[in-house]
Amino acid sequence: MSSGNMLAIFYFLLEGIGNTLLVTFTCFLSAFFTGLTVAVLRRLSPLPLQKMLDVLVFILRGIPILIAVFLVYFGLPSIGIYVSPLVAMNLSVGLISGSYLAEVFRGALKLVEPFEITVAKVAGMRQLQVIINIELPQMLRFSVPGIINEFSSVLKATPFAYTVGI
């Protein structure tokens, strides 16, 4: 094998690494913000909306990522919505991994001491201020292992991008 061929293969591998990192980070960012939004909505919403979000998370966690990618990429054009392969990956992986992260965040929110929340409310903070200033910083600290676990799951799901042409 000549050095020219090896150099071409090396550049091809670098391009693949770049695509993998692009898909991983964009999908993980969409999953992170989806999970964070669902967790905060579960915390702030009335009970019927909380139950609807619970059912939605339960359903999304049961859908295989490859099926979701196919549904988004090949199903949406049948109703007139055309998406690029990267957007299809972001939507499908973002929703499914976001539902897993929503559960991670829900568990981490339960670890925040109720006494701290009570003290913040007595000090005059509103519910949203309590969540932003007291609960979210602690929740993020408690959820680091779950976030890293879900990041590795998103990384392992990136080969599915090949099926839609990335």
Image (cartoon, rainbow, N blue to C red):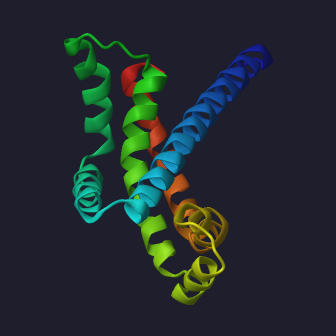
User: Left of 76 or right of it: where is 29?
Assistant: right
Q: Is residue 53 above or below residue 113?
A: above
Q: Is residue 13 above or below residue 104?
A: above
Asked if residue 149 can be seen in this view, the reply is: yes
Q: Nearer the viewer, residue 135 or 155?
A: 135
Q: Quarter of the image for the N terminus: give it.
A: top right
Q: Residue placed at 42% from the left, 62% from the top? A: 44
Q: Nearer the viewer, residue 166 or 14?
A: 166
Q: Residue placed at 57% from the left, 35% from the top? A: 26
Q: Is residue 144 above or below residue 111?
A: above
Q: Residue placed at 48% from the left, 65% from the top? A: 105
Q: Residue placed at 31% from the left, 62% from the top? A: 46
Q: What is the x, y in percent for residue 27?
A: 51, 39
User: Left of 28 or right of it: where is 55?
Assistant: left
User: Left of 34 or right of it: where is 145?
Assistant: right
Q: Nearer the viewer, residue 159 or 9?
A: 159
User: Left of 56 or right of it: where is 4?
Assistant: right
Asked if residue 153 can be seen in this view, the reply is: no
Q: Nearer the viewer, residue 146 or 46?
A: 46
Q: What is the x, y in percent for residue 99?
A: 37, 53
- Identify the residue at the far bottom of this view: 115
**Quarter of the image where one finds residue 92:** top left
Q: Is residue 70 above or below residue 45?
A: above
Q: What is the x, y in percent for residue 95?
A: 38, 43
